[in-house]
């Protein structure tokens, strides 16, 4: 009995040490996971290059990765490698192709080398500037629009070790329009040098001649509220490697479509994911190419037919994109007369009228309504004609009544009195 007790205690201590070792060990990258066995090669025509069905929840995603069936006999957690720079955010959607079910997933990123130190300072200062370089697309920094609707912000990027780069990238939060212009300057041995002269912004990156510096100034101008989630300088030489994978529970004989690069927030209900963080028993898949999602629909929150990143009024319906003053902000979402009403709802866009009074109900405020829309107000003679007609009708009715009364009185006088003297003789006389 003592022997078994000693064995039990020894086993408990060993298991406790192992548990401690697992907790204390640094996170391992998924490249060390066992690789999934390969299925027999499939004919090219048997591998779909596009999702077979159009599901509304997949339309915000610009790309997808097709994952063929994994040769497994029981449900198994698999890790799909994701190339760095392949996606614009950490929002993914995994769909089982055969059933259409949305599968829960877990995104994992591990850096295998020390990250390059980067700090940012904004002018004017705003809170939470560290969110611009935290590599988390779910955080962002707001740059408010001043009263004159002409916003400008200078973002100073400091890289103490220096960096050789030829590209600036920035990611906007969902449903945010691009800034109007961007200017990039770098502090070189010859002083502050302009590497990108003020130019319009059409995408999420700006390229320029290769430049080595440890200080960059990026100036954005904007006429709509600006919200940036990430900003970065792409180094020519990467001194670190990043292992990033997407884990999900794969079923035997099932293939999957992994959607990525959504340009707007997607809210879907997936199956229960289970514990996907545990490394034990996870199979590492091969890398599969990302393909263009043919069902992708650019985000258009106001449904005016103009995608949000190009819309000069992101949240206001204005399909014509009218911009009479050419300031980059659509007329529909401006308040020219500063009376508190945007032009698209102001019944006098150019004249202040806080009460929006409109007596004739023609949609044009009284302050700027030069034409009376009410018929009787526009034609002053109409009421008098009505009064005259009413008087004429009354006169006619009075005349008819008077004439009828006289006729009845006349008929009453003409009736003979048979009982009076001189009347007709009685019968039998």
Image: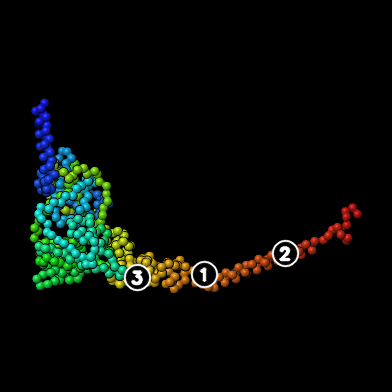
Nearer the observer, 194 or 359: 194
Alpha carbon distance from label 3 to label 1: 33 Å
Mark 3 vs mark 1: give the one in front: 3
Q: Which residue is mark 2?
A: 405
Q: Circle 3 — which element?
A: loop
Residue 169 visible in the picture:
no
Q: If the image is split into quadrants, where does the C terminus sit?
A: bottom right
Measured in 3D between alpha carbons, the distance from the residue under mark 1 to the one under mark 2, in whole angstroms, is 39 Å
Would you call the spot at circle 3 few (<14 residues within 10 Å), some (14-19), or many (20 or more)?
Answer: some
Disc on the earlier residue, 3 or 2: 3
Q: Nearer the viewer, mark 3 or mark 2?
A: 3
Give the Cα separation between the discs numbered 3 and 2.
Answer: 71 Å
For label 3, the residue is 336
Residue at point 20%, 58% (across, down) = 131
Rendered image quadrant of residue 351: bottom left
Of labels 1 and 2, earlier in sequence is 1
The residue identified by callout 1 is 376
Residue at 16%, 64% in the rendered image: 157
Q: Residue furthest top?
A: 1
Q: Residue at x 33, y 66 (%)?
A: 332
Spot occupied by residue 107 in the image (x, y as percentages of width and height): 18, 49
User: Quadrant location of residue 124?
Assistant: bottom left
Give 181 or 71, whichever is nearer the viewer. Answer: 181
Q: Is residue 41 above or below residue 153?
A: above
Q: Residue at x 22, y 44 (%)?
A: 273
Q: Where's residue 250, x and y in %?
A: 18, 43
């Amino acid at each position: 009995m003592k022997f078994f007790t000693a064995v039990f205690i020894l086993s408990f201590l060993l298991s406790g040490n192992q548990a401690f070792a697992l907790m204390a060990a640094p996170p391992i990258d998924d490249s060390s996971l066992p690789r999934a066995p390969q299925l027999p090669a499939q004919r090219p025509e048997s591998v779909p290059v596009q999702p077979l069905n159009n599901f509304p929840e997949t339309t915000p995603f610009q790309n997808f990765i097709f994952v063929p069936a994994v040769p497994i006999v029981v449900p198994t957690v698999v890790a799909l490698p994701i190339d760095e720079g392949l996606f614009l955010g950490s929002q993914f959607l995994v769909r089982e192709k055969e059933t259409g079910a949305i599968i829960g997933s877990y995104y994992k990123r591990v850096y295998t080398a020390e990250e390059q130190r980067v700090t940012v300072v904004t002018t004017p200062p705003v809170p939470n500037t560290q969110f611009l370089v935290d590599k988390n697309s779910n955080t962002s920094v707001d740059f408010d629009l001043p009263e004159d609707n002409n916003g400008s912000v200078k973002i100073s990027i400091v890289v103490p070790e220096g960096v050789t780069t030829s590209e600036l990238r920035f990611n906007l939060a969902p449903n945010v329009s691009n800034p109007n212009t961007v200017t990039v300057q770098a502090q070189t041995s010859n002083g502050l040098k302009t590497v990108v002269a003020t130019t319009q912004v059409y995408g999420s990156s700006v390229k320029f001649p290769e430049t080595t510096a440890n200080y960059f100034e990026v100036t954005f101008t904007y006429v709509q509220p600006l919200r940036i989630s990430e900003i970065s300088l792409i180094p020519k030489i990467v001194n670190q490697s990043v292992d990033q994978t997407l884990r999900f529970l794969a079923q035997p004989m099932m293939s999957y479509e992994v959607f990525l690069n959504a340009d707007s927030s997607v809210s879907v209900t997936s199956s229960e994911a289970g514990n996907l963080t545990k490394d034990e028993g996870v199979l590492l898949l091969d890398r599969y190419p990302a393909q263009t999602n043919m069902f992708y629909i650019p985000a258009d929150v106001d449904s005016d037919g103009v995608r949000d990143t190009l819309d000069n009024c992101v949240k206001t319906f204005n399909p014509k994109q009218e911009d009479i003053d050419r300031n980059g902000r659509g007329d529909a979402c401006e308040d020219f007369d500063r009376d508190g009403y945007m032009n698209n709802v102001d019944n006098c866009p150019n004249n202040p009228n806080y009460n929006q009074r409109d007596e004739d109900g023609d949609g044009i405020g009284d302050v700027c309504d030069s034409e009376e829309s009410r018929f009787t107000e526009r034609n002053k003679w109409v009421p008098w004609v009505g009064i005259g007609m009413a008087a004429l009708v009354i006169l006619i009715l009075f005349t008819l009544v008077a004439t009828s009364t006289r006729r009845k009185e006349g008929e009453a006088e003409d009736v003979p009195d048979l009982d009076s003297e001189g009347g007709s003789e009685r019968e039998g006389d």
